[in-house]
């Protein structure tokens, strides 16, 4: 798998929660590099590593060292997504969990979850996040998950106790008020315990034929993400080979341990081709170097894998609609104007 990503719906819900707290959600996201237009994009998936900056900016803006748990309280219920539909169209809550969490990647590449039996009458769901996930994200996600489970069980879901693997200065009694159950910190892992009988809670929206359609839709989206993974892997190898002049289909395929014909076919399935991926990466790199560095144009020509400045100029003009010098000047003027606001 390539770079870990989170679905755009997570950012949209966080933006709504920030607004509910009385702050400007769109401005917070602007500060971490996400525009309102991007927030409204159906295909938005943000780098999971960007979560750290998001929570840092939000903590600075609010002055709240426990912003994760408080943001979680203001999150809207997760609705209108295929994960919800899988729960509702399944026969029981337990069946919905089993089906829906096969597709958890639709929400995030950085978390997995499973249900384990603790005793004859108690089970727990364990959401496992990648190690880099910050405490705020884990706590907000726990609140949001419980809200969602209550929603799909019409209020029947209620945690009996919760454990978090992280440390926190937030008082345990305050955690208890929010979750309405005992909370333990620095535990073995993140767990939300609940009564086993809830697994058998019947869905009033159960519909076998609809469930099949929802599973087909979810599978198609997972397949789309897997195709995007391949493009990210190709980009990574191109980045490694570009300066050497060896960034071609055969060499990239060899690095990815596949035949060139297979790579060409898989890129076609992802609705692209090697030349397009190469051009997109070169364009991205050139724009980044022009906007964020003082590298000379000659050096950028070399770093983007072009042999001649004239070839680079023609390609950049075709990509962007302006020359590299015009683009750099525009970006500097924009930066000055933004700093003056």
Image (cartoon, grey):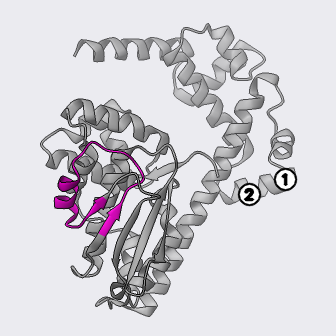
> Is 182 part of what is drawn in magenta?
yes
Image point (25%, 64%), residue name: 182
Residue 147: percent from left, percent from top: 26, 67
Which residues make up the magenta segment?
Answer: 161-183
Residue that extends furthest to the left in the rendered view of this protein = 22
Q: Quadrant of residue 158?
A: bottom left
Image point (45%, 91%), residue name: 209
Where residue 266 is drawn, which disc sits there? 2
* Closest to the observer, 24 or 96: 96
Residue 242: percent from left, percent from top: 75, 27
Left or right: where 103 falls relative to 156 = right
Where residue 258 is drawn, which disc sits there? 1
Question: Of marks 1 and 2, which one's residue comes earlier in the chain?
Answer: 1
* Closest to the observer, 72 or 5: 72
Q: Quadrant of residue 38?
A: top left
Left or right: where 338 falls relative to 300 = left
Q: How many marks?
A: 2
Contact check, label 1 and label 2, Cβ < 8 Å: yes
Left or right: where 195 falls relative to 45 = left
Q: Quadrant of residue 59?
A: top left
Residue 185: percent from left, percent from top: 35, 53
> Is 264 part of what is drawn in magenta?
no
Image point (42%, 59%), residue name: 190
Q: Secondary structure at mark 1?
A: loop
Q: What's the distance in space between the residues labelled 1 and 2, CA to CA?
A: 10 Å
């Amino acid at each position: 798998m390539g770079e870990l990503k989170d679905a755009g719906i997570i950012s949209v819900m966080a933006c709504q929660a920030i607004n509910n707290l009385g702050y400007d959600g769109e401005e917070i996201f602007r500060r971490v590099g996400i525009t309102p237009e991007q927030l409204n994009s159906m295909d938005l998936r943000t780098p999971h590593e960007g979560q750290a900056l998001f929570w840092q900016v939000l903590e600075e803006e609010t002055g709240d060292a426990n912003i994760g748990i408080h943001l979680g309280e203001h999150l809207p219920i997760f609705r209108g997504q295929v994960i919800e539909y899988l729960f509702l169209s399944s026969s029981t809550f337990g069946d919905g969990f089993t089906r829906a969490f096969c597709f958890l990647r639709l929400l995030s590449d950085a978390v997995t979850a499973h249900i384990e039996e603790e005793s004859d009458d108690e089970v727990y769901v364990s959401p496992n996040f990648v190690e880099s996930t910050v405490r705020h994200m884990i706590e907000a996600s726990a609140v949001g998950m419980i809200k969602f489970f209550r929603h799909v069980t019409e209020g029947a879901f209620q945690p009996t106790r919760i454990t978090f693997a992280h440390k926190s200065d937030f008082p345990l009694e305050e955690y208890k008020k929010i979750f309405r159950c005992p909370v333990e910190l620095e535990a073995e892992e993140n767990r939300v315990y609940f009564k086993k009988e809830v697994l058998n809670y019947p869905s009033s929206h159960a519909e076998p034929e609809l469930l099949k359609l929802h599973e087909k839709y979810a599978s198609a989206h997972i397949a789309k993400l897997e195709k995007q993974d391949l493009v990210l892997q190709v980009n990574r190898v191109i980045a490694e080979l570009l300066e050497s002049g060896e960034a071609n289909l055969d060499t990239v395929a060899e690095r990815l341990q596949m035949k060139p014909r297979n790579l060409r076919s898989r890129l076609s399935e992802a609705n692209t081709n090697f030349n397009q991926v190469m051009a997109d990466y070169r364009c991205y790199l050139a724009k980044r170097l022009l906007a964020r560095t003082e590298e000379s144009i000659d050096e950028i020509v070399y770093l983007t894998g072009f042999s001649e400045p004239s070839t680079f100029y023609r390609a950049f003009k075709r990509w962007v609609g302006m020359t590299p010098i015009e683009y750099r000047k525009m970006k500097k003027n924009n930066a000055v104007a933004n700093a003056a606001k």
